[in-house]
Image (cartoon, helix red, strand yellow):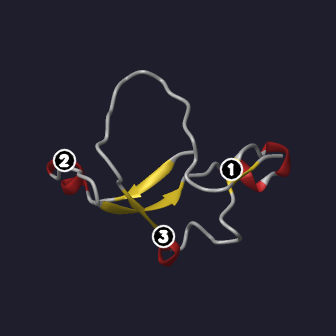
């Protein structure tokens, strides 16, 4: 699952993220999710439309962030459903 973070570019480049900081987020999704044959694992948003900005969630950082180039398995931050 890809998360699209609602943060202005100037904050991404100048702000140092620390514990307790938060940003709005909404799930990224593929157009194919409208086709039942192309569904895979996705976040269950209980019927919420992720395209409505009023439904944005809040992601709070709980510790230091580490970024590296080693591919890792991504775990979603919500309930998952699979076909």
Q: Which residue is mark 2?
A: 13
Q: Could you say where residue 16 lies in the image, as x and y percent from the top left? A: 18, 49
Residue closest to the far top: 70
User: Which residue is more in the foreground, 23 or 39?
Assistant: 23
Q: Is residue 24 left or right of residue 47?
A: left
Q: Could you say where residue 78 lies in the image, as x and y percent from the top left? A: 60, 56
Q: Could you say where residue 60 lies in the image, as x and y percent from the top left? A: 37, 60
Circle 1/circle 3 CB separation < 8 Å:
no
Q: Is residue 43 left or right of residue 27?
A: right
CA separation in Å, label 2 and label 3: 22 Å
The residue sitting at 75% across, 43% down in the picture is 40
Residue closest to the far left: 14
Element assignment for label 2 = helix
**Compared with residue 40, is residue 70 higher up or lower down, i.e. above or below?**
above
Element assignment for label 1 = strand
Q: Is residue 41 left or right of residue 17?
A: right
Give the mark nearest the N terminus, 2 or 1: 2
Element assignment for label 3 = loop
Q: Could you say where residue 19 lies in the image, as x and y percent from the top left? A: 27, 54
Give the mark nearest the N terminus, 1 or 3: 1
The residue sitting at 85% across, 45% down in the picture is 37
User: Which residue is more in the foreground, 54 or 37?
Assistant: 54
The residue sitting at 35% across, 62% down in the picture is 23
Q: Which residue is mark 3?
A: 56
User: Which residue is more in the foreground, 36 or 19?
Assistant: 19
Circle 2/circle 1 CB separation < 8 Å:
no
Q: Which residue is mark 1?
A: 42
The residue sitting at 54% across, 37% down in the picture is 74
Local crowd at mark 1 within 10 Å, few (<14), some, or many (≥20)? Answer: many
């Amino acid at each position: 699952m890809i998360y699209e973070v609602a943060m202005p570019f100037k904050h991404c480049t100048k702000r140092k993220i620390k514990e307790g900081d938060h940003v709005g987020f909404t799930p990224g999704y593929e157009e194919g999710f409208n086709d039942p044959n192309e569904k895979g694992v996705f976040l269950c948003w209980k019927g919420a439309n992720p395209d409505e900005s009023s439904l944005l969630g809040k992601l709070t950082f709980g510790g230091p962030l580490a970024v590296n180039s080693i591919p890792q398995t991504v775990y979603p931050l919500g309930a998952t459903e699979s076909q």
